[in-house]
Image (spheres, grey):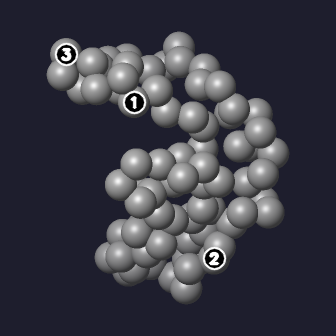
Amino acid sequence: MRADDLAPFARSMGIPARFVFPQAPLPANGGGYSWWPIDEENRAVALRDGGRDLHEAHPAGRPQARAGLETLSTPIN
């Protein structure tokens, strides 16, 4: 997804707040972006097989994504 796809969600909350949705740096299938590389083959298998628990997952590239958060953010009013 793209960061600006979340703007309608923020506005629907109807609260006086500033929401910041940073744009992930890596192009993904479908015209969106991701914070780390996506293994499309494993993703397809996981979606086919049902839900999964990701609390132990540590995707490659997460430290770089976290480090770039401030430089990639775009405020949406």
Q: Is residue 13 visible?
A: no
* Visible residue check, residue 77: yes
Q: Is residue 11 above or below residue 39?
A: below
- The image shows residue 25 at horizontal and vertical percentages of 65, 54
> Callout 1: helix, strand or loop?
helix
Between 75 and 26, the one nearer to me in the picture = 26
> What is the C-alpha distance between the residues marked 1 and 3?
14 Å
Quarter of the image that includes the C terminus: bottom right
Say which residue label 1 marks. 40
Tell me if mark 3 has few (under 14), some (14-19) or many (20+) residues whose alpha carbon lies within 10 angstroms of its own. Answer: few
The N terminus appears in which quarter of the rendering? bottom left
**Residue at left offset 57%, top offset 34%:** 37
Q: Position of residue 8 (x, y in %)?
A: 36, 76
The front one of 42 and 10 is: 42
Q: Which residue is mark 2?
A: 75
Q: How dense is the environment of label 1, judged by Cα within 10 Å: few (below 14), some, or many (20 and up)? A: few
> In 3D space, how far apart are the residues under numbered discs 1 and 2 (Cα atoms)?
30 Å
Q: Would you identify the image quadrant in which residue 30 lies?
A: bottom left
In terms of sequence position, does the residue under pointer 1 or pointer 3 come before the other? 1
Residue 13 location, x and y as percent?
Answer: 36, 73
Q: Nearer the viewer, mark 1 or mark 3?
A: 1
On the image, numbered disc 3 is attached to which residue? Answer: 49
Query: Are the residues tagged 1 and 2 within 8 Å (C-beta)?
Result: no
- Name the residue rendered at 51%, 82% in the picture: 16
Residue kind at label 1, given as amino acid type:
Glu
Image position, residue 45 (x, y; %) = 27, 18
Under mark 3, the amino acid is Asp
Q: Earlier in the sequence, mark 1 or mark 2?
A: 1
Q: Secondary structure at mark 3?
A: helix
Tell me which amino acid carries mark 2: Pro
